Amino acid sequence: MWKKVAESKDLIILENSLKDHKLKIEARKKSSGWEVFHTKIKGENSSLLSEFVLDNKTQVQELIEKLKRRNAPVSVINDTKTINIYMKRAYKEDYVEKWLFYIGDNKNRNVVIVKYGDIVNADIIMEEKLIYLEKAIISQIEDRLGLKDAGREINYEVFYYKRHSIIKKNTEPEYNMDLMDIEFGFPPDDEN
């Protein structure tokens, strides 16, 4: 359960105590906007989970609500069979693969880039509205790509986007007929 530790016009701090660690959301107003830090605290150790820079307090409050829901128990997170993930390989090189994936009937494209080495690094870029499915999506990506079977450490970095744009341009090559010198070679007529 999230508890408000402090709130003023330029500071918001919330904490959530779990079984073996605490989660903390801290928002501080700076001259250029707001900085938001999401940290995990376990004993004397703390690790930064994510950091954001926002323009105004309304954006900060929206983000805080999303971060609070991010770690909320949702039944769909534990039951990965309830989501349908469709994956298509975009490219494969020696140590790097790029996969496109879609969730259910949603046509918005999400991306996972896997870099193989002693440690496997996976960058996942997906829609912000899928934030509550993060664990289920990661689990299915691991299963589909066989990352669990590799027996190596896997580092995930997850990025979210709110919207995407598609720009289509119809370009036609420009021809300048004045610069072209076209000659047609016809054999000479034999009049003999």
Image: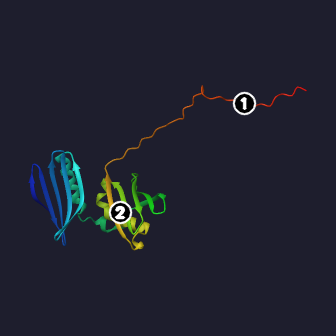
Identify the residue shown where x is 39% and y is 67%: 142
Q: In which quarter of the image is residue 182?
A: top right
Q: Considering the image in quadrants, where does the N terminus appear? A: bottom left
Give the residue at mark 1. Answer: 184
Q: Which residue lies furthest to the right in this view?
A: 192
| Between marks 2 and 1 in the image, the one whose residue lies nearer the viewer | 1
Q: Position of residue 119 (x, y in %)?
A: 37, 68
Within 10 Å of disc 2 (Cα), the crowding (few <14, some 14-19, many 20+) is many
Q: Quadrant of residue 44?
A: bottom left
Q: Which of 104 and 42 is in front in this view?
A: 42
Tell me if 180 is positioned left or right of 151 in this view: right
Tell me if 51 is positioned left or right of 134 in this view: left
Amino acid on which disc 2 is placed: Ile
Secondary element at tag 2: helix
Residue 1 appears in view: no
Amino acid on which disc 1 is placed: Phe
Q: Position of residue 85 (x, y in %)?
A: 40, 61
Cα distance between the residues tagged 2 and 1: 63 Å
Q: Where is residue 114 in the image (x, y as percent from the top left)?
A: 41, 62
Give the residue at mark 2. Answer: 137
Q: Considering the image in quadrants, where does the C terminus appear? A: top right
Identify the residue shown where x is 32% and y is 59%: 158
Q: Earlier in the sequence, mark 2 or mark 1?
A: 2
Residue 31 appears in view: yes
Within 10 Å of disc 1 (Cα), the crowding (few <14, some 14-19, many 20+) is few
